[in-house]
Image (cartoon, helix red, strand yellow):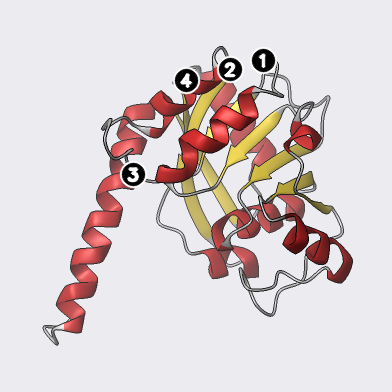
Amino acid sequence: MRMSSTNRVAVLGAGAFGTALALAFARAGRDVTLWGRDAVRMERMARSRLCEVALPGFLLDPRITPVADLGAVADVPVIVLAMPAQALRAVCEALALVLSPGHAVIAAAKGMEQGTGQFVTEVMADELGPQRFGVLSGPSFAEDIARGLPTAVSLAMVEAMDAQALAAHLGSTGFRIYHSTDVRGVEIGGAAKNVLAIAAGIVVGLGLGE
């Protein structure tokens, strides 16, 4: 996958994590289209340049363009899906109406789909057809990413060269992306991490220590 010909990335999902990823990709020198389903909110973000409730106190980088129209990402070659796993299928169904084959579509969602038990890349493949699918996951917090604090994550795709090219394309000094071909392993790690984090929170809440 040749990344030198484009500087454009789309992030779908304007919550805290999606907005933080948009800031990280802009910091890496990319032009970012940030999509959210609430048209009023996205228009307000475009005018004020404030991250609003997602990341209060943070400003949008000038390279970030908030939109509410999925058609705006139809010709963006790299698309990152940053919404909860349970919302992923509905967004992919809508995205399939505007997307042609040949994109790199990366899931930043952690977990599995309730009911089907499918991993996120399986949901994406069901709805989007022939694309280059991958998954981005790791121990990261939205506010740390937004602030540019050192963060390391993994990007897994079936083709090693695709994963390596995208990791270099989206990463930066403060947002280190390691590339891998172990798509399922990274998906399982992301899902298990959430379960362990909840359990750890319960332990701390019970006063049993960290």
Q: Check if mark 4's residue and mark 1's residue have beta carbons within 8 Å.
A: no
- Residue underneath mark 4: 125
Name the residue at 60% across, 39% down.
Answer: 80
Q: In the image shown, does 182 or 174 lie closer to the viewer?
A: 182
- Residue underneath mark 1: 102
Q: Earlier in the sequence, mark 4 or mark 3?
A: 3
Which SS class for mark 3?
loop
Which SS class for mark 2?
loop
Name the residue at 72% across, 49% down.
Answer: 34
Type of residue at label 4?
Ala
Q: In the image shown, does 113 or 199 lie closer to the viewer?
A: 113
Type of residue at label 2?
Gln
Type of residue at label 3?
Gly
**C-alpha gap between disc 4 and disc 3:** 16 Å
Name the residue at 70% across, 58% down.
Answer: 23
- Residue 22 screen position, x and y as percent: 68, 53
Left or right of 175 on screen, residue 198: left
- Residue 7 screen position, x and y as percent: 81, 36
**C-alpha gap between disc 1 and disc 2:** 5 Å
- Residue underneath mark 2: 131
Left or right of 132 on screen, residue 137: left
**C-alpha gap between disc 4 and disc 2:** 8 Å
- Residue 50 screen position, x and y as percent: 77, 72
Location of residue 189 by image quarter: top left
The answer to whether residue 43 is above or below residue 11 is below
Mark 4, mark 2: which one is toward the viewer? Answer: 4
Q: Earlier in the sequence, mark 4 or mark 2?
A: 4
